[in-house]
Amino acid sequence: MSEPVLDVKNVTKTFRERGGRRFRALDDVSLTVREGECVGVVGESGCGKSTLARIITRLILPDSGSVRFCGTELTEAGGAALRRAYRDMKMIFQEPRSSFDPRLTLGVSIRAALKPVMRGRREQEAEVRRLLHVVGLEPRFAQAYPRQVSGGECQRAAIARAIAQKPRLLICDEATSALDVSVQAQVIELLTAIRRETGISYLFISHDLALVSSFCDRTYVLCGGRVVEQGPTAQIIREPREAYTKRLLSSVLTI
Amino acid sequence: MERETLLEVRDLTVRYPGAERPTLRDVALTLHPGQITCVIGESGCGKSTLFHAIMQLPGRVEITEGSVSFRGQDLRDMTKQQLRELRGNGIGVVFQEPGASLDPIRRIHVQFYEAMRAHSRRVTKQAAREKAAELLRSMEFPDPDRILASCPAQLSGGMNQRVAIALAMALEPDILLCDEPTSALDVTVQAQIVDELLRLRDEYRTCIMLITHNMGVVSKMADRVAVMYGGRIVEYGPKADVLHHPAHPYTRALLEAIPTLDGQPPRGIPGKRPDVFPAAGCAFAPRCACASPDCGTCAMEKHLILEAHWTLCPKGVTDGV
């Protein structure tokens, strides 16, 4: 089998709290995402989900362990190698508005993401229109400012910008948590369609097990900085082995 | 037997100052003691406006038609003093942000004392503290004294939300209005808050009105469900009827958009909600799978399906049940 797109091995991260105490945010975490796969990471606030995302995107470095992305060791990469990695790995966040510059139109922000891979302003603008079409937004949204559009529309624009450089991995950190259920379903449908067409891989970080259950092929359950359970999503939902997973599942309120 | 009516919202039409069209139209609701009513719908459907209208926050909304009355008295006929009494003693409020109603750097026992003192001059610090400890114990805090001596900034979001509920309950209101009380919390904490609210209802016969878009919470808690879209209640009825035999196309679409544990992908509702609600006809028609040309003009009347279960959509009656 070919090498996974993302291979996180034995990552540990400790933060120093005020007063000198040490807080272990991640403890020996390993995780893989293969080509075209959608992998879920679930857990409660404070379980280390976001620390993991920040280590994978190399916003912070782990104390020990390795993060290999498309054959590059990210914990040691620098300069050109890191820039190449960032082209292939994109991220969307819970608050789409805060990831856009409020002073720029959505079109300008998306075009900025195209500049490294495409020359010529006219070409770029045509590509912005195509990307907006892909995410289901009309061309007029290129002229809109982030504050003028709804949360769902802004998240669509964030997805358009994220896929502009044709990345191989998209990290979604609670990307639909701030949206209404019906808008959330629209965004999930969009991510599913993009995956079908481009074969992109997703790392889907969420606290919503019900959402992960339909969207992710495999799931990791994170608790207190450790992976307590992993496996095919359907199996984890149907036959959870760990007490923590069972507790998490039993607190999902369903109709 | 006629049950006691706590709050009656009658044909309420509400407009924000300066707005051309009303944000709420013909909303009618009746709340009884010990009953839990859930109001569901997307953001922008008018849920929070209804909240503002009930609380009569000054300068916020303008009631153009209809009325809100508490124990038979119209809120507009109340004096400032009576309204002050109403907010707190009559109606307690819990907001979405756990910290929103708490001062982050003031010890919790002081906040209980101040809230109770604002409504009754006779309250002593000792009495306030005892009442607070009792409420916190009923909210399953094992060590209420430690919590009372802490500041909200030292507690987690879930703990603060339980403190906020206890604080709203300190004045023993008849009605507890909760605006998305669980949305900002983790699922495990969410389940806990739901249990606490149910226990309060059982213990104090508090009437709870819950605004939420979490259908799981609705399913666990509600007696009655009101579905809102475009400023109107489009469907109303007992929980089991609305969730299991939804009659309005919007309710059905909303239920299909909810992710479930069985692995079925959620289905989005095509289109987006209107920014301005239409002057006539059904606001949902442009997104509705079973809309016909006359939906844009038809009169918005209640169509009864079963006793106490009605919908605004005439089609819901014929092919819904």
Image (cartoon, coloured by chain):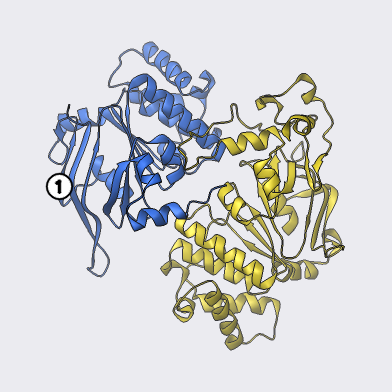
Residue under label 1? A65
The residue lying furthest to the front in this view is A239
Q: Colour of chain B?
A: yellow
Q: Residue at x 36, y 45 (%)?
A: A236
Res B99 visible? no
Q: Which quadrant of the structure image shows residue B273?
A: top right
Label 1 sits on a secondary structure element that is strand
Q: Residue at x 68, y 40 (%)?
A: B245
Q: Residue at x 58, y 53 (%)?
A: B217
Q: Is residue B206 above or below residue A226?
A: below
Residue A18 location (% of width, % of height): 27, 66
Q: Quadrant of the C terminus of chain B?
A: top right
Q: Is residue A148 above or below residue B80?
A: above
Mark 1 nearby-residue class (10 Å; few <14, some 14–19, many ≥20)? some
Q: Nearer the viewer, residue A65 or B128?
A: A65
Res B160 visible? yes
Q: Quadrant of the N terminus of chain B?
A: bottom right
Q: Colour of chain A?
A: blue
Residue B147 location (% of width, % of height): 46, 76
Q: Nearer the viewer, residue B104 or B159?
A: B159
The three-letter amino acid code for the residue at tag 1 is Gly
- Write down the chain letter for disc 1: A
Q: Is residue A123 left or right of residue B62?
A: left
Q: Is residue B99 left or right of residue B15?
A: left
Q: Is residue A225 left or right of residue B69?
A: left
Residue B206 location (% of width, % of height): 69, 67
Residue B280 location (% of width, % of height): 80, 30
Q: Is residue B92 above or below residue A213?
A: below
